[in-house]
Amino acid sequence: MDTIISLLTPPGKAAIATLAIRGPGAWDITRQLFRPLKGTLPDVPTPGRFWFGRLGTTTCDEVILAAKVDGVEVHCHGGVQVVRMIENLYVERGARIVAWQEFTDPLLEMLVHAPTARTAAILLDQWQGAWEGIDASTLNADQVSRLVKLVPLGRHLIEPWKIAIAGAPNVGKSSLMNALAGFTRSIVSPIPGTTRDVVTLSVAIDGWPVELIDTAGLRPEATGIERQGIQRAMEAIEQADLRLWLLDGSVTPIFPDDAKGWTFVINKIDLHACWDWQIASTARRVSAQTGEGIPELCELISRTLVPSPPGPGEAVPCLPARVDWLTKK
């Protein structure tokens, strides 16, 4: 096992930088370089102890040295040259510089990138040992089934779920996106073909990270740039985790060629009904203009994406090795 050193704080000019050292030579090298302000360093460090002193040889920096369970941390001044000096001192004595991603626990790296408080809480549970009680040899069928059901969630604790909003021109796709986001992201116009490209927006719905995809209105007679936009819309729809087909409740409805795989939403319920909405009896009814039905639609989206959320401390398969093991069961 190598002795490694890694900069855990962002590089650049800062007040403080943190360097972590791990491996068989971490403490021995540190004892060679560090002189505490008072007393001497012990032969074997006690995790949790820290010392103030100077680290270096000819050139030194005043630092705080902290003993950790798996190594030591050096908290020094954050200038680029100071950090480089300390790294070089350790490298000269056999250590190897690694990126912080290689140094840290992969769960901790995921936690750093968690986009919402809800997914961060789940990842924190995993990092604190939620998976430690999982023993492949003792899991029963129900436990395996539960873990398998949580695999999609594990894959989206960092990467957002993709939700495509599709439909004919002028049914209110852009208005619905704006309503779900709570602010104006897409241009709204009564002119068909206004949305000519895929417009995306990252939001949180019930604490789950979601990327809303506003697509061009689908109509066969489109040409030129609008046609290119429709082609991109079709590609986005194919890649989406959830597909919403929007129907205009105030004009004759246009349904997709293939009704399978769609969640239907009737928009403009604040206007006079032009057709029997019971034809799409399972469709959610909303008004993107007034906001009516939007909370219920968000609830539906949340239940569809995560039908049974994990409880506090429950194991969720989010690392590739764990997902691969479960999907092969």
Image (cartoon, rainbow, N blue to C red):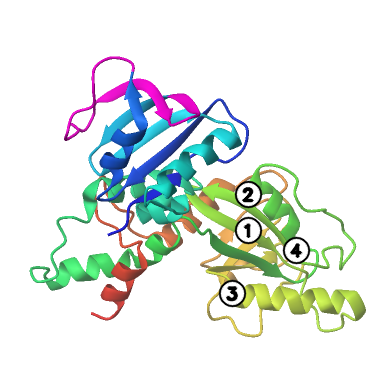
Q: Which of marks 4 and 3 is nearer the N terminus?
A: 4
**Residue beneath label 4, please?**
171
In the figure, is residue 55 to the left or right of 327?
right
Q: Mark 4: which amino acid?
A: Val
Q: Which element type, helix, strand or loop, lies under badge 3?
A: helix
Point out residue 54 in the picture as x, y percentages from the top left corner. 40, 23
Q: Which of marks 1 and 4 is nearer the N terminus?
A: 4
Point out residue 232 in the picture as x, y percentages from the top left corner. 74, 75
Q: Give the range drawn in magenta.
A: 37-62
Question: Does the CB distance between marks 3 and 2 fall below 8 Å?
Answer: no
Question: Does the CB distance between marks 4 and 3 fall below 8 Å?
Answer: no
Examine the rendering and report whether any part of residue 29 can be seen: yes
Nearer the viewer's eye, disc 4 or disc 3? 3
Q: Which element type, helix, strand or loop, lies under badge 1?
A: strand
**Residue beneath label 3, please?**
239
Q: Where is residue 190, by image quadrant?
A: bottom right
- Residue 180 circle label: 2
Q: Earlier in the sequence, mark 4 or mark 2?
A: 4
Q: Where is residue 266, by image quadrant?
A: bottom right
Q: Mark 2: which amino acid?
A: Leu
10 Å crowding of disc 4: few (<14), some (14-19), many (20+): many
Q: How far apart are marks 2 and 1 (CA)?
A: 9 Å
Q: Which residue: 29% across, 24% down?
A: 50
10 Å crowding of disc 3: few (<14), some (14-19), many (20+): few
**Residue beneath label 1, please?**
212
